[in-house]
Image (tube, helix red, strand yellow):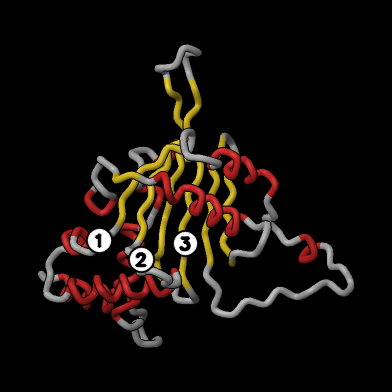
């Protein structure tokens, strides 16, 4: 069965009875791309040892832009016996100079849909789209550990949302890009989804991504859509 045929069947199966018609095919392709390539919980073999998952969503349409998984490892090859190291893996769409993240994500999904027409395997299509699959070592990346440490001082809940202050300014964002940030530590989990407001986990995550930008190298392990 071709990819186009399987996509049509998936849309029919997903459509609830006597409700609105199924979403346009481009959004179904977007959801499939996000599921197989932009789920950071699939970047390492055992996600229970991951520390942070980050996923950037462009515009209200949640176009995939990048996703990052960060794992805390113990390097047993040091003189001290164990040195904590932070390893990151990332998938990112190809980017044109000066292009906004949402435009990069939208262009990528449309490219996948075009290439997938008549194809039997979305995974093979993703191999041909220029997706970046990369590794980075935060321990050796300049300023990465300093930015990582700022996570403990983030604003997970807007203070005036739970304790209103008279005259407080209202935040307004139209068609904002958003980021999902998930932390996983011993007996603690925290997830944030929202716009890149200053001081929030979303803004911090994007700053971390910018800090890591010069430190990425091509990954030697198979990409998530090939697992």
The structure residue drawn at horizontal position 50% and vertical position 45%, both measured from the top left corner, is: 52
Disc 3 or disc 2, which is closer to the eye?
A: 2
Estimate the spatial distance between the alpha carbons at disc 1 and disc 2, rounded to whole Å: 10 Å
Left or right: residue 64 compared with residue 82: left
Estimate the spatial distance between the alpha carbons at disc 3 and disc 2, rounded to whole Å: 14 Å
The structure residue drawn at horizontal position 75% and vertical position 75%, both measured from the top left corner, is: 170
Vertical relation: 87 (above or below) 34: above
Vertical relation: 173 (above or below) 134: below
Residue identifier under label 3: 56
Q: Secondary structure at mark 2?
A: loop
Q: Quadrant of residue 12?
A: bottom left
Residue identifier under label 2: 95
> Could you tell me residue 144's position as x and y percent?
53, 42
Q: Nearer the viewer, residue 76 or 100?
A: 100
Please tell me which of labels 1 and 3 falls first in the chain: 3
Q: Secondary structure at mark 1?
A: loop
Please tell me which of labels 3 and 2 falls first in the chain: 3
């Amino acid at each position: 069965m071709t990819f186009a045929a399987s996509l049509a069947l998936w849309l029919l199966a997903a459509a609830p009875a006597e409700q609105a018609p199924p979403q346009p095919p481009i959004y179904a392709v977007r959801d499939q791309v996000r599921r197989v390539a932009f789920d950071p919980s699939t970047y390492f073999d055992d996600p229970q040892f991951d520390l942070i998952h980050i996923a950037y969503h462009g515009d209200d349409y949640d176009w995939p832009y990048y996703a990052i998984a960060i794992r805390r490892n113990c390097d047993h090859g040091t003189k001290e016996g164990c040195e904590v190291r932070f390893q990151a893996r990332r998938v990112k769409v190809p980017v044109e100079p000066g292009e906004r993240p949402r435009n990069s994500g939208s262009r990528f999904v449309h490219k996948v849909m075009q290439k997938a027409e008549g194809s039997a395997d979305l995974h093979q299509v993703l191999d041909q789209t220029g997706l970046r699959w990369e590794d980075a070592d935060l321990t050796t990346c300049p300023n990465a550990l300093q930015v990582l440490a700022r996570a403990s001082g983030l604003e997970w809940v807007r203070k005036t949302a739970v304790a209103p202050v008279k005259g407080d300014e209202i935040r307004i964002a139209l068609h904002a890009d958003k980021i999902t940030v998930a932390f996983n530590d011993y007996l603690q989990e925290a997830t944030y989804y929202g716009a890149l407001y200053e001081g929030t986990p979303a803004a911090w995550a994007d700053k971390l991504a910018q800090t890591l930008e010069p430190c990425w190298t091509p990954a030697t392990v198979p990409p998530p859509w090939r697992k």
